[in-house]
Image (cartoon, coloured by chain):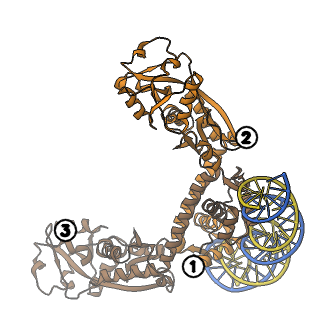
Chain colours: A orange, B brown, C yellow, D blue
Amino acid sequence: MTEWDIKKLQILRTLDERGTVTATARALLMTPSAVSQQLSNLAKQVGVPLLEAHGRRVRLTGAARLLLVHADAVLAQLERADAELAAYAKGEAGEVRVGAFSTAVPALVVPAVRALRADHPGISVRVREAEAGAAYELLAAGDVDLALSLAAQAPRGRDGRFTRVTLLADPLDVALPLDHPLARADALRLADLADEPWIFGGSGPWSEITRAACEAAGFVPEQAHSAAGWEAILAMVGAGMGVALVPRMAGAGASGRAGVAMRELAERPHRHVVAAVRRGAEGSPAVSHVLAALRGAASP
Amino acid sequence: MTEWDIKKLQILRTLDERGTVTATARALLMTPSAVSQQLSNLAKQVGVPLLEAHGRRVRLTGAARLLLVHADAVLAQLERADAELAAYAKGEAGEVRVGAFSTAVPALVVPAVRALRADHPGISVRVREAEAGAAYELLAAGDVDLALSLAAQAPRGRDGRFTRVTLLADPLDVALPLDHPLARADALRLADLADEPWIFGGSGPWSEITRAACEAAGFVPEQAHSAAGWEAILAMVGAGMGVALVPRMAGAGASGRAGVAMRELAERPHRHVVAAVRRGAEGSPAVSHVLAALRGAASP
DNA sequence: AGAATCGTTCAGCTCAGCTTCAAAGAACGA
DNA sequence: TCGTTCTTTGAAGCTGAGCTGAACGATTCT
């Protein structure tokens, strides 16, 4: 018995409601003959008699009543699936898997999810943290439906598979020790820090961005230390071990804390946060709702 | 969309596991063509695309993943139904509806259910209290699967539709006021009470049994009062308003309470408690287990 | 007793779904 | 770059599950 048939269960349920084969047939727009055949067929599959003659009508056996309990559950579940799929078609249900680099989660994804809860309660978001560089591969592999990455990170391989939109320009501030002579200078320029010891990731996207910004300012930064997380970097800056470029999204809550000063730069360098979806997926209602929520979270 | 097909859901689930149409077809002993047709058919029914091309393979859309959640629930439910029906066939599952007259519930049904819980946890009993006279009609109508009644109650209409077994002979004691002169007499006979005022139900089975017992002893009882419940009858006896025949099953806890004396009679009259099932139903494993448990409760 | 209602069975037919064959697209290796 | 291989999908034909209609036995109502 591995060959369940929903129609037969529906017939059984209707028979339980109506009480007679003829009435069941009428209700389901079938002939009594068909109903009888289907039910005896079901009984054969189950291996237990489901009906027994009672006068000129039939009565459900204990096995049939037992089966009905499950049939009700199954049919209810299918009806729920039906409703949810209808909602999905209207964009009011569904799960969207979002890949985001770590600092984007509190800054963008969480506010977006909060807004979605209010506007589209049927849409759920599954977050998966991933480095900005790995985002496109997750997207291409189908492991996420929407990826947050950085404009500097080109998708590996040919583009055109993705649709990308810039969500916001995140300013890059410099973090330097509170007791540093330049901590209070006005019109601080990147070149002023050319001789400082720098702290940035040994590899990975952020390393490249820092290096590129400094080279655009005309110097090559001396990499005194390296770390992957902002916590570690800011701790080293606070200890006077060097300076670092920190996106405002990541450094927002860090200013003034633990001996660190966050300063805006005269060059106003930025990193551009982009959202990418697979080409064609922007038409999916659920994805487009999440995208809209992310836009809203980016530019309040 | 009201035409769900389990097989299609199974195909979708297998596709999710295996990842490719060809592998799915191999796993389900079908051709890739059939799998493809079934899935595009399902998508058409749902009204939302379920697959999208990804290189030379296919990927599930959000709608498909949403549908999969429900499909898993449905298939699990069906598997549970399968297991329970298999258990039912072995007599280890199922619900048996028992109709019983009121005093039989604490005396027989409850102990039987207790024993069943230990020996056959899959079998559940649904109790429905019904007068002994109405039991056969409930049984015939299919509202219960097993009825407890009294031997004196003949099934209305022709017999032969039912199988009846006597569970126990319940002695009929006489209840009389504690201060009654005969309350301490030895070898008390029913005829000694011929001139007492009698209390018994105005109609219904118990009335007949009392009347028949007295007439067998050679007198016609004077019906001084009538009541339907044992509580009321015993209260009247305790108040010295008359005497009554009380089955031991009902009067067990009443002796010595509220001025009532329960005395055994020399004639040792009995009422016979019988269990009845529809002819053929005694073969049903669940019913026969309940029947066995009732036998056990009747003769410990 | 007669009539009406009900369920089941049997023969015949229709259509969903499977298989086979073929074609087109995409990835991989030389 | 080109050819090979893997994959999916489409068209045509066939098989079988399931439906219809009629006939029959059984039961209930009048």
Query: Residue B123 or A97: which is nearer the viewer?
Result: A97
Q: Is mark 3 on a helix, strand or loop?
A: loop
Q: Residue A49 carries which label?
A: 1
Q: Percent position (x, y) of residue B240?
A: 16, 68
| Residue hosting label 3 | B241
Q: Given this view, does label 2 or label 3 mark the residue nearer the observer?
A: 2
Q: Mark 1 lies on which chain?
A: A
- In terms of sequence position, does the residue under pointer 2 or pointer 1 come before the other? 1
Query: Residue B29 or A105: which is nearer the viewer?
Result: A105
Q: Answer with the quarter of the image where residue B226 lies.
A: bottom left
Q: Given this view, does label 1 or label 3 mark the residue nearer the observer?
A: 1
Query: Residue B62 or B275: which is nearer the viewer?
Result: B62
What's the residue type where badge 3 is placed? Met
Say left or right for A206 vs C5: left
| Residue hosting label 2 | A160
From mark 2 to mark 3, how far is it between C-alphas?
101 Å
